[in-house]
Image (tube, helix red, strand yellow):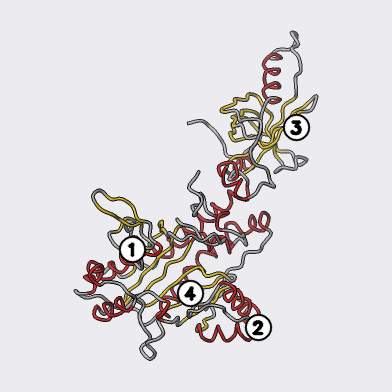
Amino acid sequence: MSERVVVKNLAALSDGPVTVSGWVETVRDQKKVQFVVLRDESGAVQLVNPAVREVDPEVEGSAERLATTEAISALAHGSFITVTGELKHDERVKLGGIEVKIATLEVVTAANPETPIAADSSLDKRLDWRFLDLRQPKQALIFRIQTTFEHALRQYWIDNDFIEIHTPKLMASASESRAELFEVDYFEGKAYLAQSPQFFKQMAQSAGFGKVFEVGPAFRADPSFTSRHATEFTSVDAEISWIESHEDVMQLHEELLVAGFTAVKDKHGEQISELFGIELEVPSRPFPRIPLAEAKRIVAERGYEIPRADDDMDPEGERQIAAYVKETFGHDFVFLTDYASSIRPFYHMRNAEDGSLTNSYDLIYNGVEISTGAQREHRVDVLVEQAKEKGLEPEELEFYLDFFRYGVPAHGGFGMGLARVLMLMLHETSIREVTYLFRGPTRLAP
């Protein structure tokens, strides 16, 4: 391994020899001196080279200095280089108060001189060249935030005795309905890409695991072109046993999010403020809770009539109720509860007093739904009847129904879209900005 030092660690070193590697961000090629801004995965540093424009036979090393000068003059933006030289602390240097005087420079790989994207390129164009787009500090920070957020969620789960599971993404039958399933050839038959780990999370309850979580891919064959939809996305899922109602799931959900937001603010708050121009807030507990019927009344009183034929809330309705919650409670999150059974999956438990409602919720963050959670129905005879009501054939669900024929505790859980959380956390306008490589109806590359 080389003795390479990443840029963020340079400030703690004393003046002296150092080796740095990264890509060229800018070159200022002046007559007597050259400046190169080198960026790596941790930050940027200024490199300086006293320029030599011709060989002086009387000066030792003049030829080598000329070669270095010419190499710097020829550097294209994005070229990867390794430099050894003298680290010097100098308060006059605007970029971090340090610079490296170049002794040797190696061009590891030279970039094409014409860069295909610019700061004002469209999002689609930037996605075509995603690996270049991700070199930008703002874009790279998104995935450091994602790493910190996921780590904090896992730490919460581990501290609270959850078990991590990895469920299969190839399924023999649908988990909810066939309307949004990707069908794939599977040897002599057909398989489906999993919409969620729902059935297998519930199997873990029957297995006696108690509390489980998974962070993994999910697939929806949904031809939507909105800023919040994708055909492949990362789903954050949890399921717990021995609950009394969906209130237990909501409490878990908000505790988990507070842990994640706290970690992100502590580690990245200053950078988020600098690069995104926002002050990240850690949500207070408890999050507001509003039954869906009441939320609809509030929205109507604000002058918006939901134009849907079913019993669901629409995106504008979610924005309106979020605005109300922000104005009334000063909160960015709200649980909309007690959704109608007509728009919920067959495995959501019905309200004991009103069978037209379910023990379920949607979590709205900054005006967008990021998650659905519920208490699950654990009585097999009720599950069968509810599946029939939804037009599903119990025979196709036998493997799932078997989970409930040998005992299972009362349980519930949620699934949450990771990219939606990040998008809203950072006030971005599209999940494409916060997805490493986006997949949608018209994008399968890169």
Dot 3 and dot 2 residues touching (CB under 8 Å): no
Q: CA distance from mark 1 to mark 2?
A: 46 Å
Instruction: Tell me the distance, in whole angstroms, between the alpha carbons under discs 4 and 1.
Output: 24 Å
What separation in Å lies between label 3 and label 2 (alpha carbons)? 58 Å
Question: As rendered, which of 301 and 65 lies closer to the eye?
Answer: 301
For residue 415, which quarter of the picture?
bottom left
Secondary structure at numbered mark 4? strand
Three-letter code, disc 2: Gly
Residue at 57 percent of width and 28 percent of height:
109
Question: Viewer-nearest of labels 4 and 3?
Answer: 4
Amino acid type for the residue under numbered disc 4: Asp
Number of numbered callouts drawn: 4
Task: Compare marks 4 and 3 and give the one earlier in the sequence.
Answer: 3
Label 2 secondary element: loop
Which residue, as the protein is rendered here, is positioned at the far top? Answer: 57
Q: Nearer the viewer, mark 1 or mark 2?
A: 2
Q: Which residue is mark 4?
A: 362
How far apart in space, not on screen, are marks 2 and 4 (Cα)? Answer: 22 Å
Answer with mark 4 or mark 1, whichever residue precedes in sequence.
Answer: 1
| Residue type, numbered disc 1 | Ile
Disc 2 marks which residue? Answer: 303
Q: Residue at x 41, y 70 (%)?
A: 414
Q: Of the numbered discs in the image, which one, if any, rests on residue 163?
A: 1
Q: Residues within 10 Å of mark 2 (few under 14, many from 20)?
A: few
To which residue does mark 3 refer?
28
The quadrant holding residue 252 is: bottom left
Q: Percent position (x, y) of residue 360? A: 42, 78
Q: Secondary structure at mark 1?
A: strand
